[in-house]
């Protein structure tokens, strides 16, 4: 479920030019991302943590479909945050609604790594939906 939010300015973050990895906590599942063959789910910004996670079988809730209209894809970037695009005012407004926000909090749908560092991403406990409709 992709798309765009017509009520916010669309950003075009710098794309990764070299391979990097994203390790998800808890569980420690790690994805190696090769920009030439990056997995894509067409959800969130292209190359975003949400886009790559969903395409790789890692579930992160995203009630709005990854268009920066909710806070359900809240993540905490424990390592490598400085290699990600800057958050926008619209993203910050949505994060204000998320529980447990930290200085490293971002929305997975808006967080696009540039590939200069590996990432460690925590999916907060409240965001892990263990029961889904089939």
Image: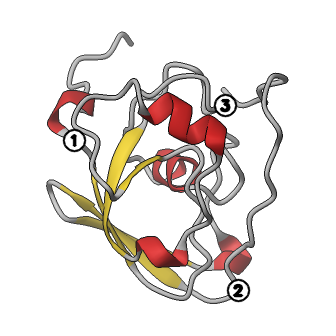
Q: Quadrant of the N terminus?
A: top right
**Circle 1 crowding by C-alpha within 10 Å: few under 14, some 14–19, many from 20:** some
* Rendered-image quadrant of the C terminus: top left
- Report, in whole angstroms, how far the alpha carbon at label 1 lies from the one at label 2: 29 Å
In the rendered structure, find residue 17 and report the number of the disc placed on it.
2
Q: Position of residue 132 (x, y in %)?
A: 31, 16
CA neighbours of label 2 inside 10 A, class few (<14), some (14 to 19), many (20+)? few
Q: Which residue is mark 3?
A: 67
**Nearer to us in this view, 31 or 93:** 93
The residue that appears at 36% across and 10% down in the rendered structure is 133
Residue named by callout 1: 124
Checking the image for residue 79, the label placed there is none
For marks 2 and 3, the one nearer the N-term is 2
Q: Nearer the viewer, mark 1 or mark 2?
A: 1
In the rendered structure, the answer to whether residue 35 lies left or right of residue 131 reads right
Q: Residue at x 78, y 31 (%)?
A: 8
> Which comes sooner in the sequence, label 1 or label 3?
3
Residues tagged 1 and 3 counted as in contact (Cβ below 8 A): no
Using the image, determine if residue 10 lies above or below residue 22. Answer: above
Q: Circles 1 and 2: CB distance less than 8 Å?
A: no
Q: CA distance from mark 1 to mark 3?
A: 20 Å
Disc 2 + disc 3, Cβ < 8 Å: no
């Amino acid at each position: 479920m992709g798309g765009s939010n017509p009520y916010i300015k669309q950003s075009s973050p710098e794309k990764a030019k070299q391979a990097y990895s994203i390790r998800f906590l808890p569980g420690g599942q790690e994805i190696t991302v090769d920009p030439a063959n990056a997995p894509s789910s067409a959800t969130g910004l292209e190359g975003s943590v949400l886009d790559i996670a969903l395409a790789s079988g890692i579930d992160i809730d995203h009630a709005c479909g990854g268009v920066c209209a909710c806070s359900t894809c809240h993540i905490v970037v424990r390592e490598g945050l400085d290699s990600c695009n800057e958050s926008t005012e619209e993203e910050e407004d949505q994060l204000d609604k998320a529980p447990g926000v930290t200085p490293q909090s971002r929305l997975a749908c808006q967080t696009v790594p540039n590939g200069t560092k590996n990432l460690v991403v925590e999916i907060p406990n409240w965001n892990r939906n263990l029961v889904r409709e089939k």
